[in-house]
Image (cartoon, grey):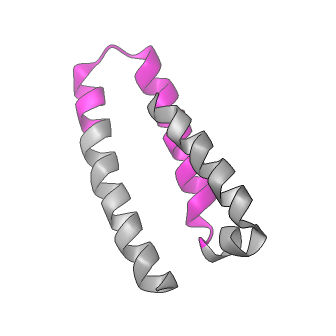
Amino acid sequence: MFAATFAADLIDTAIKGADHFRALGSEYPARIAAGIVLCAVAAWTGSRRFHLLFAALYLAYDLSWILRLYDTLG
């Protein structure tokens, strides 16, 4: 389910156009790709430690991304 949010984000960004995509910078496609890969790993592993670390670290990273994004696009 979480991986679907990355696809939805890509669709939303495509709707907003190429200028919006470029404004997000090179980190955006890397962020999407890493998120999808990590979701795939999470789907195949039963490690509660991985799931906990993934959730906690991604939440912290996502908050950082949002704060940096709005600071630069503002």
Query: In percent of the image, x 63 and y 76: which residue is there?
Result: 23
Please identify the quarter of the rendering in which residue 70 is found: bottom left
Does 32 appear above or below 37?
below
- The residue nearer to you, when weighing 11 against 72, is 11
Q: Is residue 47 left or right of residue 19?
A: left
Q: Position of residue 49 (x, y in %)?
A: 22, 26
Please identify the quarter of the rendering in which residue 55 is found: top left
Is residue 2 covered in magenta?
no
- The residue nearer to you, when weighing 3 against 54, is 3
Does 15 appear above or below 49?
below
- The residue nearer to you, when weighing 66 against 37, is 66
Query: In percent of the image, x 40 and y 83: which residue is there?
Result: 71
User: What segment is highlighted magenta in the picture?
Assistant: 24-53
Q: Is residue 38 left or right of residue 9?
A: left
Q: Position of residue 34 (x, y in %)?
A: 53, 45
Does 55 appear above or below 61?
above
Seen as rendered, the residue at the extreme right is: 18
Query: In percent of the image, x 68 and y 67: which residue is there?
Result: 21
All told, the count of numbered labels is 0
Q: Is residue 19 left or right of residue 38?
A: right
Q: Is residue 19 left or right of residue 45?
A: right
Specify the principal SS of the magenta part: helix
Does 39 appear above or below 58?
above
